[in-house]
Image (tube, rainbow, N blue to C red):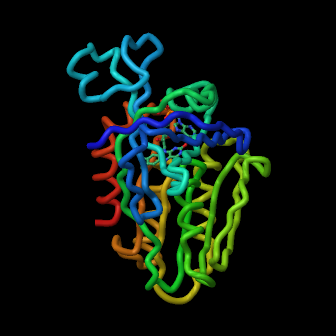
Amino acid sequence: MAVFHGIVQSREQLTPALVRVVLGGPGLDGFVMPEETDAYVNVAIPPAEAPYGPVFDPADVRETYPQELWPVRRRYTVRSWDATHRTITLDFVVHGDSGVAGPWAANVAPGDVLVFQGPGSGYHPDPEADWHLMVGDESALPAIAASLESMASGATVVVRLVCDGPDHEVPLSSPGNLDLQWLHRGGDVDKDGALLADSVVALDFPAGRVHAFVHGEAQEIRLIRRHLLTERGLTRRDMSCSPYWRRSMSDEAWRRVKGEFVAAMEADVA
Ligand SMILES: Cc1cc2nc3c(=O)[nH]c(=O)nc-3n(C[C@H](O)[C@H](O)[C@H](O)COP(=O)(O)OP(=O)(O)OC[C@H]3O[C@@H](n4cnc5c(N)ncnc54)[C@H](O)[C@@H]3O)c2cc1C
């Protein structure tokens, strides 16, 4: 897979928990943005003591150095690609001091370098659908925001997003006709984990065939997916649905059990 590196052009605090990083420079030469609106890149963040970098090939590093010096890998959605200036915009959730990518974004400065591979992608709002449903948390916000911008004029789009409070909301624009609701966590993990699913259960679905995009925390996504497939009659083809991250697990721990989780999620609606 092609390896790119971007030089940080700017860092902007969008909300208390969301940081926008714009990458540019010649290390993006050859980057081709897919048509899909959930395009993502695999970023590679080296440990502070790495004897290589800042530009490196992750495969070479894995061959040359012991595992504790390998870069940490994380996936981030391409919020936007500016073909004229050849810049990539990524929006990072900063969830406290934990993790690697969140703290990287919290502390990054112009001139810093980010190595990444990709892009991968899988979803574009189906223009043939009668209406669209988009559900997610802050990690899915970049893909949902990009998807909203690509909507046909007047398309019906129902959007349910969860965040920590009004100051965590971001403005969203779309040529579509939006029914947008932000849900606010109250600090109780169990209740908060059901907010998105409850909001979908409570929805009066518009008539016709829906195309759904449902991404975010694993347990939350699983509840919604089960509801859509068993009680709303959607088929797997009607939705793009995947667990981006799992509460209380680092991405390494999550990747180790993700296959099992996805198999169990499939079995929910066998
Ligand atoms: C295809 C794809 C696209 C993605 N796009 C984006 C994106 O555009 N922006 C984005 O911010 N994330 C995105 N994610 C999710 C992101 O990759 C994970 O959240 C990742 O685990 C964050 O890495 P970290 O190093 O900050 O934390 P980790 O080291 O993985 O985790 C440390 C701790 O933080 C918790 N944690 C992880 N993510 C969150 C979160 N979002 N909110 C609260 N707690 C969390 C973990 O459960 C763990 O307890 C995407 C994931 C996928 C698969």
Give residue 142's position: percent from left, percent from top: 56, 54
Within the image, what quadrant is residue 97 found in?
top right
> In the depicted view, which residue is nearer to us: 199 or 238?
238
> In the depicted view, which residue is nearer to us: 46 or 144?
46
Residue drawn 51% across and 31% down?
101
Please say if 7 is above or below 213.
Answer: above
Give residue 58's position: percent from left, percent from top: 30, 29
Residue drawn 35% across and 55% down?
265
Q: Residue furthest toward the left?
A: 63
> In the depicted view, which residue is nearer to us: 8 or 90?
8
Within the image, what quadrant is residue 252 found in?
top left
Q: Residue furthest toward the bottom?
A: 207
Give residue 155's position: percent from left, percent from top: 58, 82
Query: Which quadrant of the rendered structure holds the C terminus?
Result: bottom left
Within the image, what quadrant is residue 12 found in?
top right
Give the mark count: 0
Residue drawn 39% across and 60% down?
34
**Left or right position of 208 against 198:** left
Query: Which quadrant of the rendered structure holds the N terminus?
Result: top left
**Left or right position of 218 against 236:** right
Please say if 174 is above or below 256.
Answer: below
**Left or right position of 151 against 181:** left
Residue drawn 43% across and 43% down?
28
